[in-house]
Image: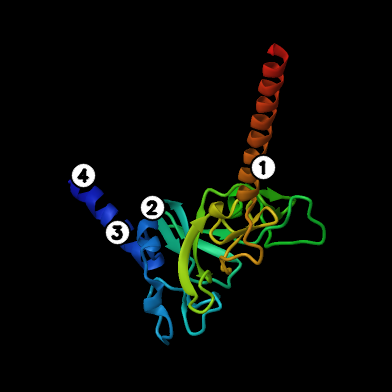
Protein backbone atom coordinates (compact mmCIF):
# COMPACT_ATOMS: atom_id res chain seq x y z
CA UNK A 1 0.00 0.00 0.00
CA UNK A 2 2.84 2.34 0.87
CA UNK A 3 4.53 1.55 -2.45
CA UNK A 4 1.32 2.35 -4.35
CA UNK A 5 0.90 5.58 -2.43
CA UNK A 6 4.49 6.64 -3.09
CA UNK A 7 4.10 5.83 -6.78
CA UNK A 8 0.86 7.85 -6.97
CA UNK A 9 2.49 10.85 -5.30
CA UNK A 10 5.49 10.69 -7.64
CA UNK A 11 3.22 10.42 -10.68
CA UNK A 12 1.12 13.35 -9.47
CA UNK A 13 4.24 15.47 -8.98
CA UNK A 14 5.44 14.67 -12.49
CA UNK A 15 2.03 15.63 -13.92
CA UNK A 16 2.02 18.92 -11.98
CA UNK A 17 5.55 19.69 -13.11
CA UNK A 18 4.72 18.95 -16.74
CA UNK A 19 1.77 21.35 -16.57
CA UNK A 20 3.76 24.21 -15.08
CA UNK A 21 7.20 23.74 -16.64
CA UNK A 22 8.69 22.82 -19.98
CA UNK A 23 11.91 21.01 -19.11
CA UNK A 24 14.77 19.93 -21.36
CA UNK A 25 18.33 18.78 -20.83
CA UNK A 26 21.22 21.07 -21.67
CA UNK A 27 22.36 18.60 -24.34
CA UNK A 28 18.94 18.71 -25.99
CA UNK A 29 19.03 22.50 -26.05
CA UNK A 30 22.52 22.69 -27.55
CA UNK A 31 21.54 20.18 -30.24
CA UNK A 32 18.50 22.17 -31.41
CA UNK A 33 18.64 23.21 -35.06
CA UNK A 34 17.17 26.70 -34.76
CA UNK A 35 17.05 27.08 -38.53
CA UNK A 36 13.93 24.92 -38.34
CA UNK A 37 12.21 27.74 -36.41
CA UNK A 38 13.07 30.70 -38.64
CA UNK A 39 10.54 32.52 -40.79
CA UNK A 40 7.56 30.93 -39.12
CA UNK A 41 4.42 32.26 -37.49
CA UNK A 42 4.10 29.24 -35.20
CA UNK A 43 6.77 28.64 -32.56
CA UNK A 44 7.21 25.32 -30.70
CA UNK A 45 6.01 24.94 -27.11
CA UNK A 46 9.61 25.14 -25.85
CA UNK A 47 9.93 28.69 -27.26
CA UNK A 48 8.85 31.88 -25.50
CA UNK A 49 7.58 33.30 -28.80
CA UNK A 50 9.15 35.69 -31.29
CA UNK A 51 12.88 36.07 -30.80
CA UNK A 52 15.04 38.89 -29.54
CA UNK A 53 17.89 37.56 -31.68
CA UNK A 54 17.66 40.13 -34.51
CA UNK A 55 16.89 37.45 -37.11
CA UNK A 56 13.52 38.41 -38.56
CA UNK A 57 10.55 36.11 -37.98
CA UNK A 58 12.45 33.64 -35.79
CA UNK A 59 11.41 31.95 -32.55
CA UNK A 60 13.07 32.80 -29.24
CA UNK A 61 14.52 30.42 -26.65
CA UNK A 62 15.42 31.21 -23.07
CA UNK A 63 16.08 28.55 -20.42
CA UNK A 64 17.52 28.51 -16.92
CA UNK A 65 19.26 25.30 -15.90
CA UNK A 66 19.57 24.10 -12.31
CA UNK A 67 21.80 21.31 -13.64
CA UNK A 68 22.52 19.59 -16.96
CA UNK A 69 19.24 17.62 -16.78
CA UNK A 70 16.86 20.31 -15.53
CA UNK A 71 16.60 23.31 -17.86
CA UNK A 72 13.24 25.08 -17.67
CA UNK A 73 11.76 27.48 -20.19
CA UNK A 74 11.44 31.12 -19.22
CA UNK A 75 8.01 31.14 -20.85
CA UNK A 76 7.26 34.77 -19.96
CA UNK A 77 10.49 36.33 -21.21
CA UNK A 78 9.43 39.93 -20.66
CA UNK A 79 8.31 39.32 -17.07
CA UNK A 80 10.59 40.53 -14.25
CA UNK A 81 10.20 37.07 -12.71
CA UNK A 82 11.33 33.58 -13.73
CA UNK A 83 9.00 30.83 -12.48
CA UNK A 84 10.82 27.62 -11.60
CA UNK A 85 8.88 24.41 -10.89
CA UNK A 86 10.32 22.46 -7.95
CA UNK A 87 10.31 18.65 -7.75
CA UNK A 88 7.21 18.73 -5.55
CA UNK A 89 5.32 20.76 -8.16
CA UNK A 90 5.47 24.04 -6.25
CA UNK A 91 6.41 27.24 -8.10
CA UNK A 92 9.33 29.39 -6.98
CA UNK A 93 9.54 32.91 -8.42
CA UNK A 94 12.99 34.44 -8.97
CA UNK A 95 13.60 38.12 -9.68
CA UNK A 96 15.55 38.31 -12.95
CA UNK A 97 16.71 41.91 -12.69
CA UNK A 98 19.84 42.96 -10.84
CA UNK A 99 21.86 46.06 -9.98
CA UNK A 100 25.66 46.49 -9.78
CA UNK A 101 27.21 46.00 -6.34
CA UNK A 102 27.97 49.71 -6.08
CA UNK A 103 24.52 50.68 -7.37
CA UNK A 104 23.02 54.14 -7.22
CA UNK A 105 19.57 55.06 -8.50
CA UNK A 106 19.01 51.42 -9.48
CA UNK A 107 16.11 49.28 -8.34
CA UNK A 108 14.64 45.83 -8.95
CA UNK A 109 11.51 44.08 -7.75
CA UNK A 110 11.66 44.02 -3.94
CA UNK A 111 13.57 41.10 -2.41
CA UNK A 112 13.72 40.00 1.22
CA UNK A 113 16.30 37.20 0.93
CA UNK A 114 19.10 36.08 -1.39
CA UNK A 115 16.88 33.21 -2.54
CA UNK A 116 14.40 35.71 -4.03
CA UNK A 117 16.97 36.76 -6.65
CA UNK A 118 18.15 34.86 -9.69
CA UNK A 119 21.53 36.45 -8.94
CA UNK A 120 21.34 34.88 -5.45
CA UNK A 121 22.16 38.20 -3.76
CA UNK A 122 19.71 40.57 -2.06
CA UNK A 123 20.90 43.81 -0.46
CA UNK A 124 18.59 46.37 1.12
CA UNK A 125 15.61 45.03 -0.80
CA UNK A 126 17.40 45.14 -4.15
CA UNK A 127 18.80 42.20 -6.15
CA UNK A 128 22.45 42.86 -6.92
CA UNK A 129 25.06 41.01 -8.93
CA UNK A 130 26.06 37.79 -7.22
CA UNK A 131 26.68 34.14 -8.07
CA UNK A 132 23.58 32.37 -9.34
CA UNK A 133 22.90 28.66 -8.86
CA UNK A 134 21.48 28.63 -12.41
CA UNK A 135 23.09 28.70 -15.82
CA UNK A 136 21.32 30.38 -18.71
CA UNK A 137 20.80 28.98 -22.22
CA UNK A 138 19.47 31.39 -24.87
CA UNK A 139 19.39 32.06 -28.59
CA UNK A 140 22.05 34.37 -30.03
CA UNK A 141 23.20 35.29 -33.53
CA UNK A 142 26.43 33.78 -34.85
CA UNK A 143 27.33 36.36 -37.49
CA UNK A 144 30.86 35.13 -38.23
CA UNK A 145 29.51 34.66 -41.76
CA UNK A 146 28.10 38.16 -42.21
CA UNK A 147 25.96 37.26 -45.23
CA UNK A 148 24.47 34.14 -43.62
CA UNK A 149 23.98 34.74 -39.87
CA UNK A 150 22.84 31.76 -37.82
CA UNK A 151 20.65 31.63 -34.74
CA UNK A 152 22.31 29.36 -32.15
CA UNK A 153 21.86 28.30 -28.52
CA UNK A 154 24.67 29.12 -26.10
CA UNK A 155 24.84 28.42 -22.37
CA UNK A 156 26.75 30.06 -19.54
CA UNK A 157 26.51 32.25 -16.46
CA UNK A 158 23.25 34.25 -16.32
CA UNK A 159 23.05 37.69 -17.86
CA UNK A 160 24.80 40.25 -15.66
CA UNK A 161 27.09 37.85 -13.79
CA UNK A 162 30.82 38.58 -13.61
CA UNK A 163 32.97 37.13 -16.39
CA UNK A 164 36.37 37.36 -18.03
CA UNK A 165 35.91 35.37 -21.26
CA UNK A 166 33.09 34.94 -23.80
CA UNK A 167 33.06 31.18 -23.20
CA UNK A 168 31.75 31.77 -19.66
CA UNK A 169 28.56 33.45 -20.89
CA UNK A 170 25.32 32.55 -22.68
CA UNK A 171 26.23 35.26 -25.16
CA UNK A 172 29.32 37.45 -24.79
CA UNK A 173 31.42 38.86 -21.97
CA UNK A 174 31.23 42.67 -22.19
CA UNK A 175 33.08 44.84 -19.66
CA UNK A 176 33.38 41.84 -17.31
CA UNK A 177 29.63 41.23 -17.39
CA UNK A 178 27.80 38.42 -19.20
CA UNK A 179 25.34 39.48 -21.89
CA UNK A 180 22.79 37.24 -23.62
CA UNK A 181 20.72 37.52 -26.83
CA UNK A 182 23.58 39.18 -28.71
CA UNK A 183 25.67 39.01 -31.85
CA UNK A 184 28.46 36.55 -31.02
CA UNK A 185 31.10 38.17 -33.24
CA UNK A 186 32.56 41.21 -31.43
CA UNK A 187 33.32 44.48 -33.23
CA UNK A 188 36.93 43.96 -32.22
CA UNK A 189 37.65 40.23 -32.68
CA UNK A 190 40.73 40.25 -30.41
CA UNK A 191 39.66 38.52 -27.20
CA UNK A 192 41.30 39.04 -23.83
CA UNK A 193 42.51 35.43 -23.72
CA UNK A 194 44.37 35.94 -27.02
CA UNK A 195 46.15 38.98 -25.60
CA UNK A 196 47.18 36.91 -22.58
CA UNK A 197 48.61 34.18 -24.84
CA UNK A 198 50.50 36.78 -26.88
CA UNK A 199 51.94 38.34 -23.71
CA UNK A 200 53.09 34.93 -22.43
CA UNK A 201 54.70 34.11 -25.78
CA UNK A 202 56.46 37.50 -25.79
CA UNK A 203 57.88 36.90 -22.29
CA UNK A 204 59.14 33.45 -23.32
CA UNK A 205 60.83 34.90 -26.42
CA UNK A 206 62.51 37.63 -24.36
CA UNK A 207 63.79 35.08 -21.83
CA UNK A 208 65.06 32.88 -24.65
CA UNK A 209 66.82 35.84 -26.26
CA UNK A 210 68.49 36.76 -22.95
CA UNK A 211 69.63 33.17 -22.46
CA UNK A 212 71.20 33.16 -25.93
CA UNK A 213 73.00 36.47 -25.23
CA UNK A 214 74.32 35.07 -21.95
CA UNK A 215 75.52 31.92 -23.68
CA UNK A 216 77.32 33.96 -26.37
CA UNK A 217 78.88 36.16 -23.67
CA UNK A 218 80.14 33.14 -21.74
CA UNK A 219 81.54 31.61 -24.92
CA UNK A 220 83.45 34.81 -25.78
CA UNK A 221 84.83 35.02 -22.22
CA UNK A 222 86.10 31.46 -22.45
CA UNK A 223 87.98 32.29 -25.66
Q: CA distance from mark 1 to mark 2?
A: 49 Å
Give the residue at mark 4.
2
Task: Select label 1 or label 2 by which is in front.
Answer: 1
- Seen from the viewer's position, the closer of residues 84 and 204 is 204
Q: Counting residues from the N terminus, which is met first, the one under dot 3 or under dot 1?
A: 3
Q: Residue at x 73, y 54 (%)?
A: 100
Q: Which mark is residue 12?
A: 3
How far from the left and from the top, in percent, is residue 25? 36, 57
Badge 2 crowding class, 10 Å Cα cut-off, few under 14, some 14 to 19, many 20 or more, is few
Q: CA distance from mark 4 to mark 3?
A: 15 Å
Q: Is residue 33 left or right of residue 139?
A: left
Q: CA distance from mark 2 to mark 4?
A: 20 Å
Numbered disc 3: secondary structure = helix
Q: Counting residues from the N terminus, which is met first, the one under dot 1 or under dot 2?
A: 2
Q: Counting residues from the N terminus, which is met first, the one under dot 4 or under dot 3?
A: 4
Q: Residue at x 42, y 58 (%)?
A: 71
Numbered disc 1: secondary structure = helix
Q: Counting residues from the N terminus, which is met first, the one under dot 3 or under dot 2?
A: 3
Q: CA distance from mark 3 to mark 2?
A: 11 Å
How far from the left and from the top, in percent, is residue 141? 52, 71
Give the residue at mark 1.
199
Amino acid sequence: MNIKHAFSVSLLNLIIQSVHAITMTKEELLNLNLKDYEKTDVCPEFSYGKSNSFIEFSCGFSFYCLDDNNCQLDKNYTSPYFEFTENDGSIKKYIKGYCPKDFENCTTEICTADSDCLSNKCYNGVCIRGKSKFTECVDNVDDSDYEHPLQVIKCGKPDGEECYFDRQCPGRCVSNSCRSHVYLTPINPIHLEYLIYIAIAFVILVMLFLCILKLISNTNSAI
